[in-house]
Amino acid sequence: MAAEVSTDVLVVGAGGAGMYAAISAARNGADVVLVDKSLISRGGATIMAQMTVAAAVGEQEPDHWTHHLRDTLEAGRGLCNEELAAVLCEEAPVRIREMEEWKVGWAREGNHLKQVMAPGHQVERCVYVDFLNTGPAVAKTLRTQLGRADNLRRAGELTVTDIIVDGDQVVGAVGLDVETGEPVRIEANAVILAAGGLTRLYQRNSASVNMGGDSYALALRAGAELIDMEFVQFFPIGHLAPRMVGMDPIMWDPFRYKLGGRLLNADGKEFVQNYGHAETTDKYTAPRDVVSFAILQEVAAGRGSPAGGAFLSFKHIPEDELRSAFGPVIDRLAENGIDLRERSVEVAPIAHYHMGGIRVNTRMETQVSGLYAAGEAVGGANGANRLSGNAISEAFVFGERAGRFAAGAAAGRDREWSDAAAESAVERIRASRDISATDYGPSLAGLLVDLQEIMWRDVGLLRTEGGLAAALRRIREMRREIGDRPSESDHRFALSMQDWFDLWNGLLAAETIVLGAIKRTESRGAHQRDDFPRTDPGQAQNLITRLEGDALCVETTALVKNPIAVEPLEANR
Ligand SMILES: Cc1cc2nc3c(=O)[nH]c(=O)nc-3n(C[C@H](O)[C@H](O)[C@H](O)COP(=O)(O)OP(=O)(O)OC[C@H]3O[C@@H](n4cnc5c(N)ncnc54)[C@H](O)[C@@H]3O)c2cc1C
């Protein structure tokens, strides 16, 4: 039987990476289908991002992409795939300028792009759209370009549940139509996985509901490999208290850098400088892993804030400076009862980004012919710790490349859909309707909450062998409890079926993090082991995860090195 949809390139996920990939594949001549489990361009992280995008455009002060690369590699604590990192840094300025041509509206100062400092960068390198509008502006700009592209079809509310591989070649995917609960078969010569990260698996996170690890589970089940899954980035100064409604929990960062907000312990003292990275109030350069660790240690030493974090204070800043920097945000804070002239807020680390991910080469190819990946789904470029602002650049750069290379590979190939290869994926959706009306199976919502608690407590900021082993046992039990297909269907909007697929993927992704964290018996970047507090130079290796049958296997592999000299600086303007 013919598939319901047929195309050259299927893009899974319509965040920054997926939209860029779709635009790029279409302009390189491919027929493209872009699908998302949410509405196109409204789900995932991209639209939520409010802050900065790193690119060495050198308009604020002299800069060069090799300097951005140096900072990226340093932040990555020796584990970056240096070829991917170089591509990211070299092409980021090209994508920033293309977005500018598409009228994204980067903030300007006089006749140049305004660029600001962010942690871990040595120069003012990060562009943004004011006020706290970077993600929405990026999403809107890419959405407009999608509308202008030829040969590009879009479908929201379609959850891809399996990538279909026949022999060793991708032939398409199967998705769940969220409204009807029916399977949809999509024939494609190439599939780009751009379904984002996994931080929703943690109790305290900055994520949307769609960031539960689908990318990684889909890739593993298709036969692709993952890299360095143990590295989850905790954003150090996520909002903790007082209660704040309708605002981004990670909004404090740009204001801290812009104004010199002070991070204080319960004794009213600045402390980050005591953890190996000197910070001065005019240049907050300490990377995220260092600041998260410092807050954790202050809390453990009894010098934390009442809610269990640190204080962030702007009380020393004159009111007119506060108002000019915060703009309309200051009124939204006032609605939440927060007057920054009078009081500090409490902040603490929050799961925010995933450095690990699908293993690709610089053409964004996985090990499976016809399967590509882009955006946060990809691992390796940022090593053990991501430099702030690199994630949106990565979505643009890797998205553009994935689209271009996938279009090239898909051109001229005959489509070869295989119902036999897709059968079990289709049946997994259909069979859920045949289950007895009295057998509702385990509470999926309850299991997700359990999983989030376990990940936060045992696989979070500070890990131990005992905690990781307990997490692994419980995650494996939960995998057995939910079985290999949904146990009920509510036919309309397929909510419980979606919950089941979310958990099926989330549990597999969670297990990859735990296994990596057990294997890495050292502390490095975002992976901190209480029982192995030092960095072990002998473990300067990547960890590769693959699925063999039903079992996950983790092994070490040599780093990808690509030495590039840092160029002398001159203004690009
Ligand atoms: C609150 C917040 C603020 C941030 N701020 C910044 C910042 O200032 N600067 C920066 O560089 N980075 C920032 N980041 C990180 C950055 O936004 C992300 O890494 C980046 O946007 C990821 O883009 P993406 O396209 O790979 O994934 P996403 O934007 O997450 O898109 C993935 C898409 O895939 C869809 N999807 C998932 N599973 C499926 C499936 N099975 N089938 C179909 N579709 C699926 C989702 O619905 C989603 O639309 C921030 C992240 C968050 C959460």
Image: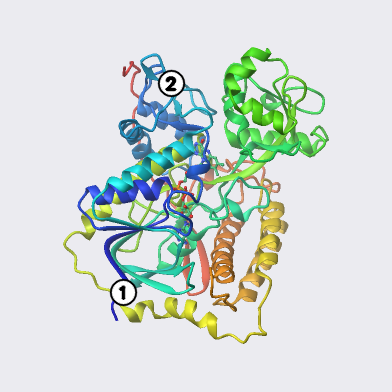
Q: Position of residue 185 (x, y in %)?
A: 36, 72
Beta carbon at label 1 within 8 Å of ligand 1:
no
Question: Does the image show residue 465?
Answer: no
Residue at numbered disc 1: 3
Q: Nearer the viewer, residue 275 or 29?
A: 29
User: Looking at the rendering, which quadrant does residue 264 occupy?
Assistant: top right
Label 2: state its secondary structure: loop
Q: Position of residue 4 (x, y in %)?
A: 32, 72
**Going from the N terminus, do you reach mark 2 or mark 1 first?**
1
Q: Label 2 is placed on what type of residue?
A: Lys
The residue lying at 43 percent from left, 52 percent from top is 40
Looking at the rendered structure, the number of numbered marks drawn on it comes to 2
The circle drawn on residue 120 is none
Relative to residue 180, is residue 95 depicted above or below? above
Q: Are the two marked residues, 2 and 1, in contact with CB atoms closer than 8 angstroms? A: no
Relative to residue 265, is residue 11 depicted above or below? below
Residue at numbered disc 2: 114
Relative to residue 526, is residue 550 depicted above or below? below
